[in-house]
């Protein structure tokens, strides 16, 4: 994980020492806003602030090679770059004294900042050299956060560690096995990709024949006939000049992202396995393979290690025990013999499916519900604390260098091949490591080639994890119902102790308001009169901004679709920015807007629908223009406006 705050250095502290008004906006957020403005002024001079989000998202590209700069700005600005928050902070930014601000808007300062507002640089007498900080933030790569390192627990002492809300105790023996510390994975400053040309007959042919020779005395391995499989493989390469396919080329080059497409059983996995073995055995390359399941991980590791390739499995911690148990069930049910012998040697992957914790004999906790530790509860790194010590420093388990459950992680730093699943690749932390990274990041520092088998299945996993969509209300799985259940269970599980925390009180209040809004919206939508609301929303996507912009247009007598009178359009946009934008962006925090009285009625726990309707009518009558009233459109839309704001 990247360090997103180090670039600020002492700048926030220096600003506060010179009287920065923290009550208007935090100094760190002020610096992030100015970083965004500095980026626009440097690379997109004269462009409005609304350009920032399309540029950072990659939808708008500059002719210059600004990709690395854009990535640095996106990471270092963080949430400040979100469109609504960006505009909100820019309005707060304009309340900062002129002497402090390094940028000023070029249009009417009396209006709220919009996407069309342009900012220009201006001199500042406070921390005058901060432009150097912003320039460095655009130029310097982001460093990784250092992973915290812990000393091993000491022999003969008693330690505690948490398990499922309880405290476990363990006492180590007076003598512990002497072992060298685990080698750490480390980031590299930079790498240069070198194209790799693979020839079918010169490179892959000898590898296939070597595999067949190695398997000649291993009848228990069914993954065979590699020379024949290579000869049967029909490979076509896209000709860059004509765009057509060139059949059976003598060689191909891997340089960047390469996509191999083929029908089932057409030889894709055969080809990638031959490339892996050739690279690891003959070219000193380190390869990472991503396969569809943990069962496939163990099978791949078993096969590669049977050939003498140093391969290790990488499996997510949360479900490691379940997958190991499934592996052993499969071994017992499908193995030809239960006890290995010289004709049926042990599966090489078995050594990596041991989920035993060496601390079990030293646990001192005696409870009726005692059970062996689950892999996700193993206190491997930073979980042990010396009992009774003040302060109780965190320690690693001293048995890690000999622990069977840590075998893969002890060997990962030097292994030729890593084999993992897409879930582990993007979700699990790389360890033991000197920097905080997920395996996907760590692979970029250690691996020469990343091979993703069944890329469509992997893409589905990535979409599920990264696409930020979720159903608000759905049976059992909706966000609304889940949050209510999680909140109630968490409070009940801790005897309601968190109820005194102001933040918990605020969360609970907002959750109740949300639950009531969901119930009321469904009551309105499912009632016979709810057809108007369903017709209004339709099947199209919408946001709070789009809905409230429709409200502003209705109040100004503008048509629902198409353009109206320019003066009325401008007035409607001004009304939205001054009256509704803050409320649309932060409805639970915004105040001082015309809908405040109606919101107070809407969020009452015992809501009076007549009082809500009356408050909304008063706001509509006070906000509607004479044109809207005279045209009769206000009367036709009044109920729709009520429904929309409900």
Image (spheres, rainbow, N blue to C red):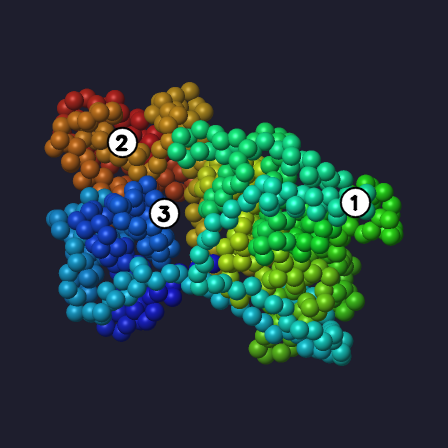
Q: Residues within 10 Å of mark 2 (few under 14, many from 20)?
A: many
Residue at 48% across / 30% down in the picture?
245
Foreground: 400 or 440? 440
Foreground: 412 or 113? 412
Give residue 216's mark: 1
- Asked whether residue 74 appears in the rendered view, the answer is no
Q: Position of residue 390 (x, y in %)?
A: 59, 79
Q: Nearer the viewer, mark 2 or mark 1?
A: 1
Q: Position of residue 506 (x, y in %)?
A: 43, 53
Q: Position of residue 523 (x, y in %)?
A: 45, 29
Residue at 58% across / 72% down in the picture?
150
Q: Residues within 10 Å of mark 1 (few under 14, many from 20)?
A: few
Residue at 30% across / 64% down in the picture?
136
Does 135 sit left or right of 402 as displayed?
Answer: left
Q: Nearer the viewer, mark 1 or mark 3?
A: 1
Foreground: 259 or 94? 259
> Which residue in the protein does label 3 denote?
588
Whichever of labels 1 and 3 marks the residue nearer the N terminus, that label is 1
Does 552 sit left or right of 611 as displayed?
Answer: left
Give residue 550's mark: 2
């Amino acid at each position: 994980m990247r360090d997103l705050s180090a670039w600020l250095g002492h700048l926030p502290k220096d600003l506060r020492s010179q009287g920065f008004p923290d009550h208007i906006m935090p100094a760190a957020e002020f610096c992030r806003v100015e970083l965004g403005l500095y980026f626009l002024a440097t690379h997109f001079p004269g462009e409005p602030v609304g350009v920032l989000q399309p540029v950072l998202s990659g939808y708008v590209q500059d002719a210059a090679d600004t990709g690395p700069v854009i990535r640095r700005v996106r990471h270092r600005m963080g949430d400040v770059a979100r469109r609504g928050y960006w505009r909100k902070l820019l309005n707060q930014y304009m309340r900062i004294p002129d002497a402090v601000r390094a940028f000023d808007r070029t249009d009417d300062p009396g209006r709220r900042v919009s996407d069309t507002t342009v900012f220009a640089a201006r001199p500042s007498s406070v921390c005058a050299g901060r432009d150097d900080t912003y320039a460095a933030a655009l130029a310097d790569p982001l460093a990784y956060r250092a992973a915290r390192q812990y000393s091993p627990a000491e022999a003969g002492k008693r330690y505690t560690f948490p398990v499922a809300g309880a405290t476990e105790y363990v006492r180590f023996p007076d003598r512990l096995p002497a072992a060298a510390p685990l080698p750490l994975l480390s980031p590299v400053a930079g790498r240069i990709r070198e194209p790799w040309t693979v020839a079918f007959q010169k490179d892959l042919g000898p590898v296939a024949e070597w595999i067949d020779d190695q398997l000649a005395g291993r009848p228990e391995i069914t993954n065979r006939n590699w020379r024949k499989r290579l000869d049967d493989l029909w490979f076509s390469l896209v000709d860059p000049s004509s765009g057509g396919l060139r059949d059976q080329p003598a060689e191909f080059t891997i340089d960047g992202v390469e996509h191999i497409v083929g029908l089932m059983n057409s030889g894709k996995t055969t080809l990638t396995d031959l490339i892996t073995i050739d690279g690891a055995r003959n070219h000193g390359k380190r390869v990472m393979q991503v396969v569809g399941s943990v069962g496939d991980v163990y099978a791949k590791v078993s096969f590669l290690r049977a050939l003498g390739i140093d391969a290790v499995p990488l499996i997510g911690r949360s479900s490691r025990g379940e997958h190991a148990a499934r592996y052993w069930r499969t071994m017992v049910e499908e193995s030809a013999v239960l006890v290995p012998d010289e004709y049926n040697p042990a599966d090489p992957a078995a050594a990596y499916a041991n989920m035993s914790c060496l601390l079990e004999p030293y646990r001192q906790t005696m409870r009726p519900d005692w059970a062996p530790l689950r892999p996700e509860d193993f206190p491997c790194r930073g979980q042990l604390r010396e009992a009774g010590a003040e302060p109780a420093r965190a320690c690693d388990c001293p048995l890690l260098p000999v622990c069977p459950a840590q075998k893969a992680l002890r060997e990962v730093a030097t292994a030729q091949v890593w084999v993992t699943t897409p879930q582990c690749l993007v979700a699990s932390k790389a360890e033991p490591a000197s920097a905080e990274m997920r395996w996907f990041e760590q692979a970029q520092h250690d691996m020469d080639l990343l091979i993703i088998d069944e890329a469509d299945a992997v893409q589905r996993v990535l979409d599920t994890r990264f696409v930020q969509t979720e159903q608000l209300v759905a049976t059992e799985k909706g966000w609304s119902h889940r949050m209510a259940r999680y909140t109630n269970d968490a409070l009940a599980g801790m005897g309601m102790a968190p109820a005194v925390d102001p933040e918990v009180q605020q969360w609970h209040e907002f959750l109740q308001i949300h639950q009531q809004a969901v119930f009321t919206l469904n009551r309105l939508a499912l009632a016979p009169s709810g057809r108007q609301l369903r017709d209004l929303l339709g099947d199209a996507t919408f946001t709070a901004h789009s809905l409230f912009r429709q409200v502003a247009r209705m109040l100004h007598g503008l048509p629902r679709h198409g353009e109206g009178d320019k003066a009325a359009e401008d007035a409607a946009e001004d009304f939205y920015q001054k009256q509704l934008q803050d409320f649309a962006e932060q409805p639970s925090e915004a105040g001082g807007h015309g809908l405040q009285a109606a919101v107070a009625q809407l969020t009452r726990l015992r809501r009076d629908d007549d009082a809500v309707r009356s408050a909304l009518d008063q706001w509509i009558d006070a906000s509607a223009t004479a044109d809207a009233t005279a045209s009769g459109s206000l009367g036709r839309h009044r109920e729709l406006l009520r429904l929309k704001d409900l």
